[in-house]
């Protein structure tokens, strides 16, 4: 009965192994681990999706490290400033790449909260 014009129905419940492998590959390649490196060399791993704005990772990093990033924390990759709207693909970050975190100094280096240089003025 397999003559011209006769079609054999496909079994709907049978998974297509090739499609499953592709979706697993896409899912695993859509998430990347990036290392955030502080000024003192401490590394923090962040696993994120390639298409999510990096501002979410900045928020998470700064919250964990108790840093107010919108008040003077900057993120760099290969010497270029990363903006919160950038994604991993925009910046070209790959698995294992590093983002360097720079916190601008506010107040005195001694931690007193006064303006920088107050120690020089008080002598």
Image (cartoon, rainbow, N blue to C red):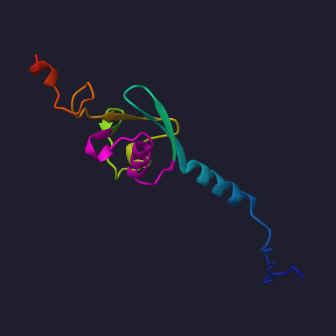
Counting from the top left corner in percent of width and height, residue 113 is at 23, 33
Residue 113 as seen in the image, left or right of residue 97? left
Residue 52 as seen in the image, left or right of residue 116? right
- The residue closer to the viewer here, 18 or 99, is 99
Residue 43 as seen in the image, left or right of residue 75? right
Query: Which residue corresponds to the image point at 79% horizontal and 72% vertical from the top-left?
Result: 13
In magenta, the rendered stretch is 48-74
Counting from the top left corner in percent of width and height, residue 6 is at 81, 83
Asked if residue 105 lies in the magenta stretch, the reply is no
Asked if residue 49 lies in the magenta stretch, the reply is yes
User: Height in image: 94 above or below 120?
Assistant: below
User: Height in image: 73 above or below 12?
Assistant: above
Counting from the top left corner in percent of width and height, residue 15 is at 76, 65
Query: Which residue corresponds to the image point at 80% horizontal and 68% vertical from the top-left?
Result: 14
Q: Residue furthest top?
A: 123
Counting from the top left corner in percent of width and height, residue 28 is at 61, 49
Query: Which residue corresponds to the image point at 69% horizontal and 54% vertical from the top-left?
Result: 21
């Amino acid at each position: 009965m397999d003559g011209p014009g006769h079609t054999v129905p496909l079994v709907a419940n049978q998974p297509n192994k090739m499609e499953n492998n592709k979706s697993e590959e896409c899912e695993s390649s859509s998430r990347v681990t990036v290392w955030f490196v502080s000024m003192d060399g401490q590394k923090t791993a962040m696993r994120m999706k390639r298409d999510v704005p990096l501002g979410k990772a900045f928020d998470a990093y700064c919250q964990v490290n108790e840093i107010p990033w919108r008040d003077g924390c900057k993120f760099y990759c290969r010497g270029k400033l990363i903006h919160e709207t950038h994604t991993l693909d925009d910046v070209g970050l790959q698995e294992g790449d590093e983002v360097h975190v720079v916190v601008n100094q506010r107040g005195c280096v001694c931690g007193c909260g006064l303006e920088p240089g107050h120690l020089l003025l008080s002598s």
